[in-house]
């Protein structure tokens, strides 16, 4: 195998093995920053040796053994330094010697729990949302700093700094490497789910830049979600989130036009929806519901997405059911954005008048004023009611609020279509 | 990107005989690994060609030919569909696929990449094809 080929093969091995490697090491040394350094050192050794020796049969085990030896060296060295400064020298040495075999045994255990610990730690609420995302993609997604930077359209140095700072914050806060229990668990789990969904959404509807979607981020998020579903199979909301992402991802091909412009749900060619992902999504939703999670935040959204997925044509959509689901969602997770979506569903089920009434009731909501979908929805309803002048003004306002160029083009086009003269044509 | 790992049929698989317990376990273990890594999309074994049929197209005519078909190497006995980050990752997973008919038996798998919309920044020529109504994706 030529050297560049080996390097690419090593990248692939890294992608597959890095998360459990870092997770296993983190349990051993109790610090994810140090664990990642050790794993990286093992990767460097692989890059030095494998082009000569070939990729070993079990590359994951090779990397783990190499990193583990380094970890044990480090622990011994640290003990040595401490001994020099301490009166307790011999006792400490005895302790460390005793501890090493335990660590070796521990690391050979099932790595699933370690991965779950790593996920919870990387998504710890002590970190900012941006830091959690970067750390999760890096430690669990196996992405390089450059890949994360490219995905988020920010300089590599920014991501690198974010990761360094996040690791320091975790160490300073002495965040234990563990799966939280009891009441804490639920809140911490929603933090993990939130991070995964943030990644997915950034890929699904890019907040900035010239592209409407960045599908690779969607794939990364889906992969993380699918992994989590295996690590915590008893958690209904995990399956709810996976269901939501699978069903939304099933529309990826249909929601972008030939020139990169967005195509809205009801205008999409449903033949281009990915039936395999829909099937997987519906199965995940059934799993969430089977675990008693039908009323979960993500399961409800997945149920709404499923209503669309089941409709063969837009006119087959069960809008009454969707309006009901939004109603439930608004009760368990009240937010102006959910209300806005409920208004859209109500408009579809009972007519634009009923929808507009709900939207206008939301108008004073401060958080909605700068939210680009608000004037967009209002514009759409006004247009359907034949109030074209008001509709045009709202479309233009929506266009001024988005940072996504593709979306802005679409909104301005719709504004122009409301111009007097062509306004009355179908 | 998606890849399909296809298991080529053998005379033995064409008889419809169930695989040995050991092989079943190896396959289950492998696929479980894929699920845990979040890369498995779909997988299934296919029934022997004696239960299938072919349709041949020639000079505007269609002829239905019932199985079984003899050239077993041309037949597929099962498939595993994965979604991965790179071609090399697919290769790495494929390398870990168990010997499809047991360690001592002859067997062959073939891996093919699926066409898909992997970027949304079509070039000029892609645009021209699209304008002509020719799909460049599927």
Image (cartoon, helix red, strand yellow):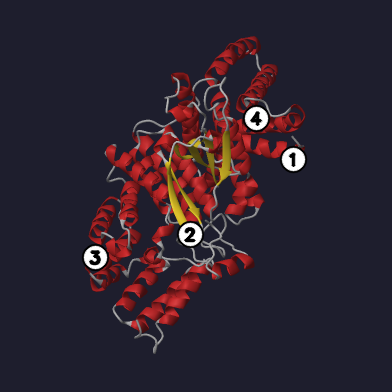
Q: Which residue is mark 3?
A: A349
Q: Chain of mark 2?
A: B
In the image, which is nearer the foreground, mark 1 or mark 3? 1
x then y, percent, for residue A119: 48, 37
Q: Residue at x 52, y 46 (%)?
A: A220
Label 4 – label 3 distance at C-alpha: 58 Å
Measure how far apart labels 3 and 2 are at the Cα level.
49 Å
> Is residue A31 among what the camera can see?
no
> In terms of secondary structure, where does tag 4 sit?
helix
Say which residue label 2 marks.
B60
Residue A310: horizontal and vertical position, in percent? 31, 54
Q: Chain of mark 1?
A: A
Mark 3 neighbour density, 10 Å: few (under 14) some (14–19) many (20 or more)? some
Secondary structure category for the residue under label 2: loop
Circle 1 packing at 10 Å, graded few (<14), some (14-19), many (20+), is: few
Q: What residue is shown at x 43% (from left), y 77% (from top)?
A: A414
- For disc 4, the neighbor class at 10 Å (few under 14, some 14 to 19, many from 20) is many
What label sits on residue A38 in the rendered view? 4
Percent x, y for residue A402? 48, 68
* Of pointers 1 and 3, the one earlier in the residue sequence: 1
Left or right: B116 in relation to B44: right
Whether marks 2 and 4 lie on the same chain: no
């Amino acid at each position: 195998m030529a050297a560049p080929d080996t390097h690419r093969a090593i990248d692939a091995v890294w992608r597959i093995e890095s998360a459990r490697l870092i997770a296993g090491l983190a349990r051993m040394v109790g610090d994810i920053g140090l664990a990642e350094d050790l794993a990286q050192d093992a990767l460097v050794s692989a890059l030095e040796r494998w082009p000569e020796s070939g990729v070993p049969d079990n590359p994951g085990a090779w990397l783990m053994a190499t990193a583990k030896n380094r970890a044990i060296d480090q622990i011994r060295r640290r003990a040595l330094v401490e001994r020099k400064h301490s009166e307790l020298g011999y006792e400490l040495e005895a302790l460390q010697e005793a501890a090493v075999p335990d660590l070796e045994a521990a690391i050979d255990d099932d790595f699933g729990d370690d991965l779950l610990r790593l996920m919870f730690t990387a998504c710890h609420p002590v970190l900012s949302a941006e830091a959690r995302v970067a750390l999760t993609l890096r430690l669990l997604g196996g992405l390089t700093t450059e890949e994360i930077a490219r995905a988020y359209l920010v300089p590599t140095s920014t991501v690198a700094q974010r990761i360094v700072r996040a690791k320091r914050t975790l160490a300073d806060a002495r965040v234990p490497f563990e799966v939280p229990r009891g009441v804490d668990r639920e809140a911490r789990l929603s933090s993990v789910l939130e991070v995964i969904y943030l990644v997915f959404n950034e890929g699904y509807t890019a907040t900035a830049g010239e592209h409407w979607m960045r599908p690779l981020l969607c794939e990364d998020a889906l992969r993380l979600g699918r992994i989590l579903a295996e690590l915590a199979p008893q958690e209904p909301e995990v399956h709810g989130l996976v269901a939501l992402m699978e069903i939304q991802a099933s529309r990826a091909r249909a929601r972008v036009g030939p020139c990169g412009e967005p195509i809205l749900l009801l205008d999409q060619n449903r033949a281009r929806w990915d039936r395999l992902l829909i099937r997987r999504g519906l199965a995940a939703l059934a799993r969430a519901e089977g675990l008693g999670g039908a009323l979960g935040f993500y399961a409800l959204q997945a149920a709404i997405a499923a209503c669309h997925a089941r409709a063969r044509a837009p006119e087959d959509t069960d809008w009454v059911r969707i309006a009901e689901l939004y109603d439930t969602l608004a009760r368990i997770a009240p937010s102006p954005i959910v209300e806005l979506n409920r208004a859209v569903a109500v408009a579809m089920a009972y007519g634009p008048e009923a929808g507009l009434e709900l939207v206008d009731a939301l108008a004073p909501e401060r958080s909605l004023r700068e939210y680009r979908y608000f004037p967009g929805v209002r514009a759409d309803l006004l247009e359907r009611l034949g109030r074209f002048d008001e509709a045009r003004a709202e479309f233009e306002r929506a266009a001024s609020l988005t940072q996504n160029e593709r979306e802005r083009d679409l909104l301005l086009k719709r504004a122009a279509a409301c111009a007097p003269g062509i306004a009355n044509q179908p | 990107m998606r890849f399909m790992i296809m298991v080529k049929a053998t005379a033995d698989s064409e008889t419809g005989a169930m695989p040995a317990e050991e092989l079943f376990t190896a396959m289950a273990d492998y696929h479980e690994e894929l699920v845990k890594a979040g890369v498995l999309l779909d997988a299934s074994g296919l029934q022997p060609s004696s239960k299938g049929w072919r349709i041949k197209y020639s000079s505007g005519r269609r002829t239905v030919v019932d199985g079984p078909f003899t050239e077993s190497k041309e037949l597929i006995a099962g498939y595993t569909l994965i979604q991965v980050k790179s071609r090399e990752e697919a290769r790495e997973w494929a390398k870990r696929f168990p010997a499809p008919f047991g360690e001592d038996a002859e067997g062959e798998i073939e891996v093919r990449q699926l066409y898909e919309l992997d970027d949304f920044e079509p070039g000029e020529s892609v645009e021209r094809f699209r304008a002509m109504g020719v799909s460049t994706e599927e």
